[in-house]
């Protein structure tokens, strides 16, 4: 499952695809049918890449990617709008038995199942995940936004009209 570039934005429902960057923030496109584009200011909104999200575990945190992979094998997912907390908890105990029951709320489980329902229809759902970048290593993957190419300006050449230079020097008078 390739979740690179898929983000969640605090205060905004659903998931978004990172498609670019400008001076004021990131340009995102919603993953729903409307494909709404928004600009998210990074100083005022919190964004989280699904690739980096973890869930509280008893011994160590569980990667969201691993939980979503296990959700693929579940035959029928409950409707998150109609399911009660205990039904969601039982499903999550099946998929992620090591999760911390006290720290992971039913609302968190609802959100994860909702995200799963959004991304399961996307082509990236069945793609192989790219290799993670080593810390401090230069990115081998192409950037989402190409850097602008430098513009080379030539210095204008002085022109001569009828043997006279167009450059004038001012004379000082005493």
Image (tube, rainbow, N blue to C red):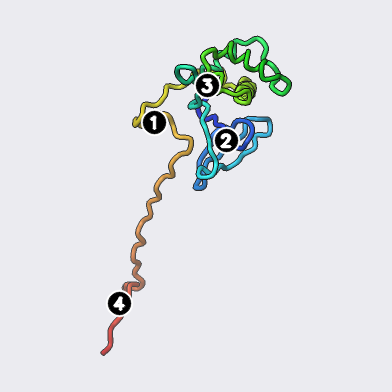
- Can you tell which of label 1 and label 4 is closer to the viewer? 1
Label 4 to label 2, Cα distance in Å?
62 Å
Do residues under tags 3 and 1 come within 8 Å of each other at their CB atoms? no
User: Between marks 4 and 3, how big is the CA–CA gap?
Assistant: 73 Å
Query: In this rendering, which labeled residue sits more in front, label 3 or label 1?
Result: 3
Name the N-terminal-most of marks 2 and 3. Answer: 2
**Real-space CA distance between mark 3 and mark 1, rounded to the nearest whole angstrom:** 23 Å
Q: Quadrant of residue 83?
A: top right
Determine which of the numbered discs, if any, sits on residue 169 in the image.
4
Picture quarter containing residue 170?
Answer: bottom left
Q: Nearer the viewer, residue 72 or 153?
A: 72
SS under mark 4: loop
Farthest residue in the left direction?
174
Crowding at dot 3, Cα within 10 Å, few <14 / some 14-19 / many 20+, comes out as: some
Choose the circle earlier in sequence order: 4 or 3: 3
Q: Left or right: where does residue 52 sit relative to residue 8?
A: left
Near-viewer residue (56 or 134): 56
Task: Measuring from the top left, give residue 108's x and y in whole percent.
Answer: 60, 25
Label 2 with label 3: CB-CB less than 8 Å: no
Name the residue carrying label 3. 64
| Lower sequence index among marks 3 and 1 | 3
Quickly name the residue at label 1.
Answer: 139
Mark 4 or mark 2, earlier in chain = 2
Indicate which disc residue 9 carries.
2
Q: In this rendering, which labeled residue sits more in front, label 1 or label 2?
A: 2
Q: CA distance from mark 2 to mark 3?
A: 16 Å
Characterize the local packing of mark 4: few (<14), some (14-19) or many (20 or more) Cα atoms within 10 angstroms. Answer: few
SS at badge 1: loop
Image position of 84 (left or right of 142):
right
């Amino acid at each position: 499952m390739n979740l690179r570039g898929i983000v969640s934005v605090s205060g905004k429902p659903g998931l978004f695809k990172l498609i670019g960057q400008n001076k004021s923030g990131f340009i995102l496109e919603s993953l729903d049918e409307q494909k709404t584009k928004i600009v998210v200011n990074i100083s005022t909104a919190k964004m989280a890449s699904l690739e980096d999200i973890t869930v509280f575990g008893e011994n160590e945190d569980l990667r969201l990617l691993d939980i979503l992979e296990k959700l693929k094998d579940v035959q029928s997912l409950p409707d998150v709008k109609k399911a009660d907390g205990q039904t969601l908890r039982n499903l999550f105990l099946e998929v992620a038995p090591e999760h911390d029951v006290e720290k992971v709320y039913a609302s968190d489980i609802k959100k994860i199942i909702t995200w799963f329902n959004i991304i399961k229809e996307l082509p990236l759902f069945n793609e192989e995940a790219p290799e993670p970048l080593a810390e401090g290593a230069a990115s081998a993957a192409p950037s989402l936004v190409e850097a602008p190419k430098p513009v080379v300006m030539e210095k204008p050449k002085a022109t001569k009209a009828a043997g006279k230079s167009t450059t004038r020097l001012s004379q000082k008078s005493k």
